[in-house]
Image (cartoon, rainbow, N blue to C red):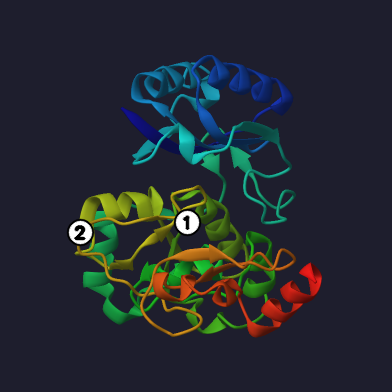
Amino acid sequence: MQKILLYYKFTPIKDPEAIKLWQKTLCDSLNLQGRILVSTHGLNGTVGGEMDDLKKYIKATKEFPGFKGTVFKWSDGGRDDFPRMSVKVKNEIVAFDAADELKVDENGVVGGGVHLKPKEVNKLVEERGKDVVFFDGRNAFEAKIGRFKNAVIPDTRTSRDFIKELESGKYDDIKDKPVVTYCTGGIRCEILSSLMKNRGFKEVYQIDGGIVKYGESYGDDGLWEGSLHVFDDRMKVDFSDHTAIVGRCVHCDGPTNNYENCAFANCNDLVLICLNCKQNPDLLFHTEECRKLGAAASA
């Protein structure tokens, strides 16, 4: 039986290249595939394979002192959801362009938001009501198929856009409110929450384990609605058999959670195209302009 592991750990790493070589050798020996990023701030990975091999991977990874407390999250899928095993050293394990601002010690990110378990998230909303603001820590297109109810969705194409967004003044009216940041597995919010606090947001929280853990706890019967976008061949994850379809097709505006890459290679944006519109080759393009440019390029 195969599964996918999602995990991250913020801890100081003196020699990222050595960790890279160790992780690549370990994964190859266990026939795992996926993506791992290493930096001086820590480790960020998603790997798939046989459950027994993944358990061996967990045990071996935790033998490194800094990774001992790593929380590994299980998800449906397997090795073939990834094209290869990639391990890379980067300046950041999530690219916020905040490598110099981010501070990490043996306890994790310094100055981040307060971690809330899924039950604590619901309790906060019960106690503080409409004052609680959910703040999406993902790219805006991810929120099109799933989000927390009434969440703020920043105008972001990549994580690098968040600092500009936070400094734009758009969110000054919520700086004194309880703000709950959320993202897929929690890693982006570790960084985002610290960036927010550094910019005057006074009461910042983050969901421990991210949307994944919240969905495991409440399925589609809590404050989350829709599907969860993931960056592998699965494209999306649903938490129950009654997941709401909140996305809309870019062409017919019908309900869908089906992502397609725009057929114009120079665009290649992920766009929502329903299964019906997908049958028409002309509608595999993001916009009419993309279709014309694609036709001109192939002429």
Relative to 55, say whether 299 is above or below.
below
Amino acid type of disc 1? Answer: Gly
Q: Are marks 1 and 2 in contact (CB under 8 Å)?
A: no
**What is the C-alpha distance between the residues marked 1 and 2?**
33 Å
The picture quadrant where one finds residue 249 is bottom left
Q: Residue at x 79, y 76 (%)?
A: 296
- Asked whether the viewer can see residue 154, the reply is yes
Instruction: Give x and y (percent) for residue 72.
Output: 40, 34
Q: Which residue is mark 2?
A: 241
Task: State the residue in front, 155 or 194.
Answer: 155
Query: Which residue, given by chain and number where applicable, does mark 1 sit on?
Result: 113
Residue 62: mark: none
Q: Examine the rendered structure and indicate whether residue 43 appears above or below residue 119.
A: above
Please state if 289 lies on the left or on the right of 45 as rendered: right
Q: Amino acid at mark 2?
A: Asp
Q: Quadrant of the N terminus?
A: top left
Q: Secondary structure at mark 1?
A: loop
Quadrant that contains the C terminus: bottom right
Q: In x, y percent, where is residue 162?
A: 63, 67
- Where disc 2 sits, the SS reads loop
